[in-house]
Image (cartoon, grey):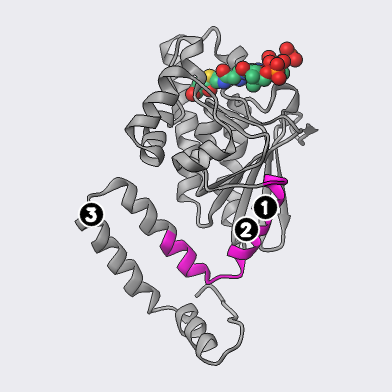
């Protein structure tokens, strides 16, 4: 944890690595639990640094070797009343929406616990990569509460009613393989999820930036609309790609049998 200029503690680290960036939630002693400082710090970074010119993808991870994020900070929440709980939920939901609205994809690299708010934060990302030690779950019922950081809504969209009910009502934890089988995570990897996520972020960075943006938008649309409206949105976004230099370059490169040089225009 480092100290910022105003003396407050910086609980999220941001590392720019050329076309990609790595954001690390940095409270390993509390298994990276989400308190207001983390929620606000990360949202601020998402709304500023994730909009940097030339950035193509962000990897989100947790510090230490035990946890991505073990949930909302239970110590902080313990004495909350309904008004404080609602404000806390609003801050976290706004963070999830800021990630979804960011111009570049986010990959959550989960090498340990991703529980409660941690699982919910990962689900706000475009992809979740899970290492051998990954454990996902919505254990809020153990504490007498329900998921409040978007979990009931994003989980059901990812895994469907049957598995969302199972996870939210039993609070049980699942590993990487089951997370992928159920549709919660994108990939189970043998080694480090962080390394795999960085590799995928670099692959994404080499693609047409406009196409990546349009694909994300179309897929988000699918989660929130009926098929006919979703297909209409996809058609418009597909057509819009043909107004870009990236489309001309991508197809010319294919036909000319050379690597594409995308400009993001
Ligand atoms: N909030 C605050 N502190 C937490 C925390 C959390 N969610 N999870 C872990 N910690 C702290 C522990 O209190 C402990 O601190 P101390 O060393 O000061 O005692 C430290 O992190 C290490 O944790 P453990 O000693 O418990 O580690 P473990 O390996 O024995 O167990 C664990 C790991 C199974 C993840 C366990 O820590 C645990 O069950 N954590 C809580 C998980 C949880 O219930 N998450 C949901 C929170 S509610 C929520 O997220 C609501 C929402 O949707 C908004």
Could you tell me how far apart the alpha carbons at marks 3 and 2 are, in whole angstroms?
29 Å
Q: Name the N-terminal-most of marks 3 and 2.
A: 2
Quadrant where the N terminus sits is: top right
Q: Is residue 167 above or below residue 220?
A: above
Q: Which residue is mark 1?
A: 196
- Which residues are drawn in magenta? 190-215
The local secondary structure at tag 3 comes to helix
Asked if the magenta segment contains residue 198, the reply would be yes
In terms of image quadrants, where is residue 164? top left
State which image quarter holds ligand 1: top right
x 43%, y 78%: residue? 244
Q: Is residue 100 above or below residue 72?
A: below
Q: Which mark is residue 142?
A: none
Could you tell me how far apart the alpha carbons at marks 3 and 1 are, in whole angstroms?
33 Å
Q: Name the N-terminal-most of marks 3 and 1.
A: 1
Of 183 and 66, nearer the camera is 183
Q: Are marks 1 and 2 in contact (CB under 8 Å)?
A: yes
The local secondary structure at tag 1 comes to helix
Q: Which residue is mark 3?
A: 227
Residue 216 horizontal/vertical position (percent): 43, 57
Q: Which mark is residue 200?
A: 2
Q: Is mark 2 within 8 Å of ligand 1?
A: no
Residue 262 horizontal/vertical position (percent): 57, 77
What kind of secondary structure does the magenta stretch mostly adopt?
helix
Residue 183 horizontal/vertical position (percent): 45, 43
């Amino acid at each position: 944890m480092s100290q910022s200029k105003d003396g407050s503690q910086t609980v999220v680290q941001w590392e720019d690595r050329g076309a990609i960036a790595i954001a690390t939630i940095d409270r390993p002693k509390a298994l990276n639990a989400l308190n207001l400082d983390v929620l606000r710090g990360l949202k601020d970074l998402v709304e500023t640094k994730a909009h940097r010119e030339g950035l193509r993808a962000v990897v989100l991870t947790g510090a230490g070797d035990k946890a991505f994020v073990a949930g909302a900070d239970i110590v902080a929440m313990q004495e909350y009343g309904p008004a404080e709980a609602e404000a806390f939920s609003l801050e976290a939901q706004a963070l999830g929406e800021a990630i979804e609205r960011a111009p570049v994809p986010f990959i959550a690299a989960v090498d340990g616990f991703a529980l409660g708010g941690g699982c919910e934060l990962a689900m706000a990302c475009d992809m979740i990569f899970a290492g051998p030690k990954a454990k996902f779950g919505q254990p809020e019922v153990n504490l007498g509460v329900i998921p409040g950081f978007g979990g009931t809504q994003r989980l059901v969209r990812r895994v469907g009613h049957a598995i969302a009910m199972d996870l939210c009502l039993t609070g049980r934890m699942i590993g990487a393989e089951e997370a992928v089988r159920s549709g919660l995570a994108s990939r189970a990897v043998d080694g480090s999820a962080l390394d795999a996520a960085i590799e995928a972020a670099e692959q994404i960075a080499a693609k047409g930036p406009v196409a990546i943006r349009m694909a994300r938008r179309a897929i988000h649309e699918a989660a929130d609309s009926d098929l006919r409206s979703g297909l209409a949105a996809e058609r418009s976004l597909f057509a819009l790609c043909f107004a870009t230099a990236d489309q001309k370059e991508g197809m010319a490169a294919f036909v000319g049998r050379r690597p594409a040089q995308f400009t993001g225009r």
